[in-house]
Amino acid sequence: MVTPNKMLCIEIAEPGGPEVLSIAERDTPRLSKGEILVKVVATGVNGPDLMQRRGLYPAPKHATDVLGLEIAGHVAACGKDVKNYKEGDKVCALANGGGYAEFCTVKSDHCLPIPRGMTLANAASLPETYFTIWSNIFMGAALKAGEVYLVHGGAGGLGITSILLGKAFGATVIAIDSPKERIKVCSKLGADRVIDYIKEDFVDISRTEFGGADVILDIIGGDNIARNIKAAKHDARIVQLAFAEGSSVKINLMPIMLKRLSYTGSTLRSRSDQQKTMIANELREKVWPLFETGDLKAVVNTVLPLSKAHEAHTLMESAKHIGKIVLNCEVVL
């Protein structure tokens, strides 16, 4: 494939709202050892993109400042020591940035094949949430079949992936969300119990109906932090992946000791290349085959052209979408 010297991408004029995103022309990124250059067909929109746009989540050292942490497309070129892919292959990948563009470089070991029969737009919605949930909930918190998995924000990107993976691997899944449209989505995806947090008390329901939760995924923070501890069984694992309602709280830590709880949190982007490769290998072996059997599926809400990145961010911030938002990088304007 002949690669142009220039490409179109989305730039951030200055930290701020969605309106600071605009189309720009930049040099096509150059390959380093172990990388592939992907002609991007689609890129997923994620929470960290919004945080970076606001100036709250700067790109790591040596990473591009162009947004976009997951992509799908065609291999345009391979760097030195790349043996697992060749030019023309279709891939989806976890990127360290640069997805909101016509071309993006990624570590070849952070790529995954496109599940049979899946579109590239749908495949672009997978890497960020699947790397995140698999590494934190299955590799980290060691969720097992038969355990109770409590998921906040069930109809969001991380929540949908949590419900699907939890059920695929035999967990009992309690999803929390509101209003009724989002509750219906959680039920349709297979959640065993869906709690409307506006009308119901998730702590009381978790304890009375299920004896508490073994693993809890929280993206809310704030008052939920103390309430998660109450909803947890003895020896439970609580995983904090975002703080929609704040990270500074005053809580009593004694129950963590008395109930022998594990409380962890993490970000994916800052993990080492070796850790991301390990996650990719497990996904390829244990998770990706389930897309072809129908046990897992991509859930995409909207596909917009790359130039509409500001609309995609506005939609995501409204919290009115269900499923992932994807940008089409072939239809730039």
Image (tube, rainbow, N blue to C red):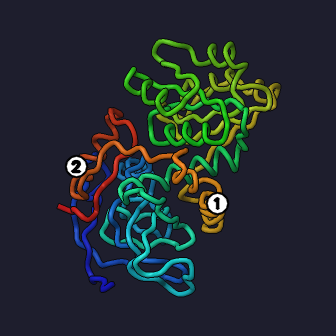
Q: Mark 2, residues whose alpha carbon is within 10 Å: few (<14), some, or many (≥20)? A: some
Q: Residue at x 72, y 32 (%)?
A: 147
Give the number of the disc on residue 285: 1
Q: Residue at x 37, y 45 (%)?
A: 300
Q: Which residue is mark 2?
A: 19
- Nearer to us in this view, 114 or 38: 114
Image quadrant where one finds the C terminus: bottom left
Q: Mark 1, residues whose alpha carbon is within 10 Å: few (<14), some, or many (≥20)? A: few
Residue 260: x percent and y percent?
A: 81, 31
State which mark lies toward you, 2 or 1: 1
Image quadrant where one finds the N terminus: bottom left
The residue tagged with tag 1: helix, strand or loop? helix
Residue 269: x percent and y percent?
A: 53, 58
- Check disc 1 and give the amino acid type: Glu
Q: Is residue 134 above or below residue 41?
A: above
- Residue 59 relative to residue 169: left or right: left
Q: Is residue 186 above or below residue 36?
A: above
Residue 324: x percent and y percent?
A: 39, 45
Q: Residue at x 62, y 22 (%)?
A: 227
Instruction: Name the quadrant containing residue 262.
Output: top right
Q: Is residue 298 above or below residue 243?
A: below
